[in-house]
Amino acid sequence: MTSRYGITVPFGGIPLAEHRDIYRELVDLGYTDVWTAEADGSDGFTPLALAAAWAPELRLGVAIIPAFTRGPALLAQSAASLADAAPGRFVMGIGSSSNVIVERWNGIPFEEPYKRTRDVVRFMKAAMGGEKISETYDSFDIKGFRLGIRPAEQPPILVAALREGMLKMAGREGDGAIINWLSADDVTTVAPIVHAAAEKAGKPAPEIAARIFVCPSEDAETVREQAKFAIAAYLNVPVYAAFHEWMGRSEVLGGMWQNWKDGDRKAALAAIPDSVVDELIIHGSPDECREHIGRYVEAGVDTPALAVMPFAGVDPLQAVRDLAPA
């Protein structure tokens, strides 16, 4: 297995104020990283700020902060503050996110996501380097900004990437890629694209971090039934649908996509093959889950960031203990 082994935080239903002992237990269990997300729950930075204070042994990663939902200067301030609080232990993840989060939930036009993500990465790199920035980027203008806080170590910036354009940008402009909603076999397609782009740009080997959805339960029937709701919720979002078309799943997911467009949610769920669930969501005994996670690492993932899916009555905290590397 990789030397890194992360888990997604915070845990739903548990107030952030009650996570101190959880973070301490993660250290004892052998987890090396905690990773947040930012959608409709906690923001991406606050849980990591708490972890920085409560569990300084952990590396902190955010996967991801959308490139649209904060202004560039504020985003640089937030990242620099966390990097200053946890020197050498913070990894910044930036991505386009989706039209659902950006446009429908935040009221911000989801326009030219590739350019916006690229421009934010370039701006962040310059800002973290202490430059005074006055520049017209393709997607925004900056006039006279200089970051007032300089972290001792600049955090790596990983780019959330699905298809080839973003994957190449992650290797060329960023320090690696964040990938999710893909199978272990899919990693063998996407990881080499990132590495080739980094090599061509003369950069060090990039980090590949993957959010991996896991449910340590042997009740396969219930897990598959409930997992199909999660798959339908994500893989009907245009950016994820396009990704899985590119990965060659048009035939196996075509029925779901068509029924979803027709408004027949029940038929859409029924059209998701069990084989797709088994590829995208790890389930089974804890040992079987660890073996499956290992396949992602063998395929090219440097940092697995597990996300526990509480299907079939699985208790998330017990799942974390069951899946621990130590």
Image (cartoon, helix red, strand yellow):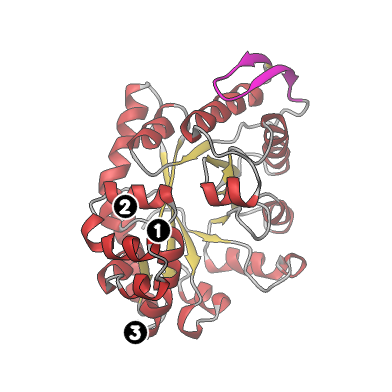
Instruction: Give 275 or 140, whichever is nearer the viewer.
Output: 140
* Residue under pointer 1: 235
The image quadrant that residue 75 belongs to is: top right
Instruction: State which tag comes first along the sequence, 3 or 1.
Output: 3
Point out the frontmost of discs 3 and 2: 2
Calculate the distance from the C-alpha at mark 3 to the C-alpha at mark 1.
21 Å
Q: Can residue 141 be found in the magenta stretch?
A: yes
Of the residues shown, which amino acid type is indicated by label 3?
Glu
Q: Name the residue: 49% across, 64% down.
A: 307
Residue 63 drawn at (x, y percent): 54, 49
Residue 61 in sight: no
Q: Is residue 42 above or below residue 287?
A: above
Q: Is residue 255 left or right of residue 124?
A: left
| Disc 1 packing (10 Å; few <14; some 14–19; many ≥20) | some
Instruction: State which tag comes first along the sequence, 1 or 2.
Output: 1
Of the residues shown, which amino acid type is indicated by label 1?
Leu
Instruction: Give 320 or 226, whichever is nearer the viewer.
Output: 226
Calculate the distance from the C-alpha at mark 1 to the C-alpha at mark 2.
8 Å
The image quadrant that residue 287 belongs to is: bottom left
Q: Name the residue: 54% across, 21% down.
A: 138
Calculate the distance from the C-alpha at mark 3 to the C-alpha at mark 2.
24 Å
Q: Is residue 321 above or below residue 231?
A: below
Are the two marked residues, 1 and 2, in contact with CB atoms closer than 8 angstroms?
yes
Q: Can residue 304 be found in the magenta stretch?
A: no
Instruction: State which tag comes first along the sequence, 3 or 2.
Output: 3
Magenta segment:
133-147
Residue 189 in sight: yes
* Residue under pointer 2: 244
Secondary structure under badge 1? helix
* Residue under pointer 3: 221
